[in-house]
Image (tube, rainbow, N blue to C red):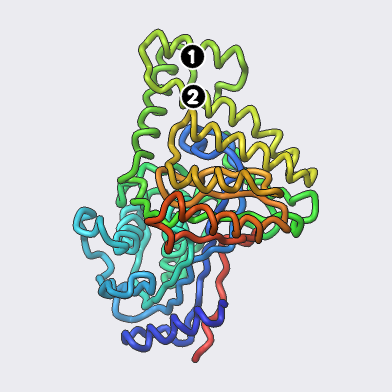
Amino acid sequence: MEQKITQKLLAAAKRLGLDIDGGSVRRTSSRFCLGIEHGDYNGMELFGIGTDRFIWLAFKPNSTGRIRIHSLNFPDDQMVDFALGEDCDPSSVEDSWERFPRGVEAILRREGYTLKTGFDAVLYGNIPGGGMSRSASLSLNLILTAFEVNGIEDEGGMQVVDLAQMVENDFIGSPCGKLDQIMIYHAREGMGTYFHPATGAIDHIPFGGNPDSFRIVSLDTGTKRPGLEKSTYKIRRSECDVMKEQLSTGLGIGTLAEILTPETYAKAVAYLESVGSQSIFRLKYLYEAQSRFQGTLDAWRAGEIEKVGANFRADGIGLRDDYRISGPELESMCDIARTVDGVLGERMLGGGDKGASGAIIRAEAFEPLCQAVSRTYPLAHPEFADEFAMHSCRMVDGIVTFPLASL
């Protein structure tokens, strides 16, 4: 498949007059969060994997001082073409994917990086829209490409992660945390990525059993979710920020991540009730998800995928009933998956509302799951009968770069 995609990228570049021959391809992955979804902006520990739905960017530095880039996912859109240092009002590109290359250039310039060399590029992605972090994958890819053609060192750690979050927060207007960027940038094949927010440290934890015994499945509902800046994600994040401020003022609790014991949880709930908080149910999900988190890590280390799946399912029920960030199509996928033997856990993915759900299954359950979804989902949502899809995913490195062979 990869050879076919690179040939498509080369052919498109030739057709558009872009010079990428002899350049490189950077492939950035999607991600699958195993715990805690929506924990990143609440200061919580995170665990997830990189998955093999990708964005491929074929590129080569140019001598024009311009970024010239075309997306095969939007073939009717004009090629994005702008000069380095050219100011851009974010509102002028808010409905176009152009906001990502524009945002990357603007944020790097704002943060003091000297960009003198532009690049020609063509990209293609097969990451489902909503749930597996397509925007983070694209932002990371573009930042690393701008670094490479300008000879800027990638220092590792959180440098590129922080910049990618800035692109989304400050230019796009999406109030995302760092979960997506961390899980893609630091992803390693065959391993889970464990992030410690207190220290910023990353641990890579190999799965303790046979990774071929299970599958990670994306259940793309066929719905089109707008960016997080236009979804109800903003509401949930704002409500959590308000709870944090209330608890900081009243109880000296700095982050919702500090609510770890039954006693602290009861005290926090009582205080929030006393000040009339309308979001206590969201705290319930976060508290219970944190209580399951260490069990998920232990089960992963031990190769007990059944326990990982059970906790994944419990998180999904909490996201649906307490955090209240799921949607009808997402839950239809989960309801169907739950009826199939060998499905160990299922839940909505990512920012919520629309997009994709996910499942952890025994390897032999993939075909029965596909059959059940194909038979039932179109009956529940006929408007998406030609749009939904299922993808069996494996754990991969988050960032891979290789030479672009000529046609």
Seen from the viewer's position, the closer of residues 107 and 73 is 73
Seen from the viewer's position, the closer of residues 221 and 298 is 221
* Relative height, residue 107 to residue 13 (above, below): above
Please tell me whether mark 1 sits on a helix, a strand or a loop: helix
Does residue 173 appear in this view?
yes
Please tell me whether mark 2 sits on a helix, a strand or a loop: helix
Question: Which residue bears the numbered disc 2?
Answer: 283
Kind of residue at badge 2: Leu
Q: Quadrant of the N terminus?
A: bottom right
Left or right: residue 404 compared with residue 62: right
- Residues packed near mark 1 inside 10 Å, few (<14), some (14 to 19) or many (20 plus): some
Total numbered labels? 2
Does residue 164 appear in this view?
no
Q: Determine whether label 1 and label 2 are within 8 Å by CB.
A: yes
Kind of residue at badge 1: Val
Question: Which residue bears the numbered disc 1?
Answer: 269
Q: Give residue 339's position: percent from left, percent from top.
A: 63, 45
* Relative height, residue 221 to residue 252 (above, below): below
